[in-house]
Image (cartoon, rainbow, N blue to C red):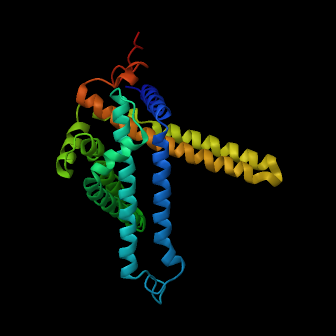
Amino acid sequence: MGFFATIGRGWKMSKLSMSVVKKDPELIVYMFICGFLSSVAMIGMSVPQYLEQSWAIDSQGQMTPAYMGFVFAGYMTISIIVTFWNSAIVANSHIRLTGGDPKFMDGVSAAMSKIHIIIIWGIIAGTVGLLLKVLNQAARNQKGGAAIFAMILTAIGATIWWMMTFFMIPHMIIENKGIGESMKSSKKMFFKSWGENITSGLGIGLIGGFFIIMIAILAFVLMSVLGPLWYIGLAVGVIGIAIALAWTNAAEQVAVTALYLYSKNGEMPQIYQDLGMTNFQMGSPTA
């Protein structure tokens, strides 16, 4: 399976997943809400340090234990927010990919019905993510071969965690499983014979990054050409990049849902089959 075949499948999967987002623009709204709430939480975490409040920063300019706990709680809040809205996207895309016509509140209601599981998983995923960041930073602070070795180990750990939790949300939200059972099912599903093809099918991030770069270049050109009205070009860039990021992130969750259904049913959802993807590898367009 060559490099260009991999890129071709990734491009096909990306276009189909993004077309689902086009059919259900509420998925982009979900991402905007997620981004807004996450930004509010991030700003809230930073304010005490910015204002150098005594409970947050000591006389040596170091973070106090209380502020460290506050920051940790903030990270967990952001993780829960992201998990909640990703769950809403998975729920809505599952309705679409199984022949339904989801409404805005369908995904929100599905996520709210599993809020206890979402909170627990958000805390677990957030804690692991934070630990991986700390380990990665510690590895970067090493010198020579020790730094390289530590960074490799950290990357391996992050990859293993990603593979084990790839299908966590579909199992939690669609199948109503608990954390432990969902992780077992997610791991089993990922390591099926077709699991190694998943990364090649999810070229969405790469394609989304391409469009973001193009938008940034366009914004830069507009800012240069418009002169005193440079802020119009800046606004175009900010809005365009925000939409591209939201669309890309939503499409990634749609693709995960499609791959979940493929694993469960042995065939891609009908909306994908109609456009030629009769299985995870390319098929001929249906008549």
Q: Which residue lies most toward the top here?
A: 287
Residue 115: % across, % down:
29, 54
Count of all numbered marks drawn on residues in the image: 0
Q: Is residue 50 above or below residue 267?
A: below
Give left or right: position of 266 versus 85. Answer: left
Q: Which residue lies most toward the bottom here?
A: 59
Near-viewer residue (73 or 174): 174
Near-viewer residue (194 or 53): 53
Quadrant in the picture for residue 100: top left
Residue 35: % across, % down:
49, 54
* Residue 148 in view, yes or no: no
Residue 39: % across, % down:
50, 61
Q: Is residue 162 above or below residue 25?
A: below
* Residue 38 in view, yes or no: yes
Near-viewer residue (1 or 117): 117
What's the residue at 69%, 46% (across, down)? Answer: 219
Give left or right: position of 205 versus 134. Answer: right
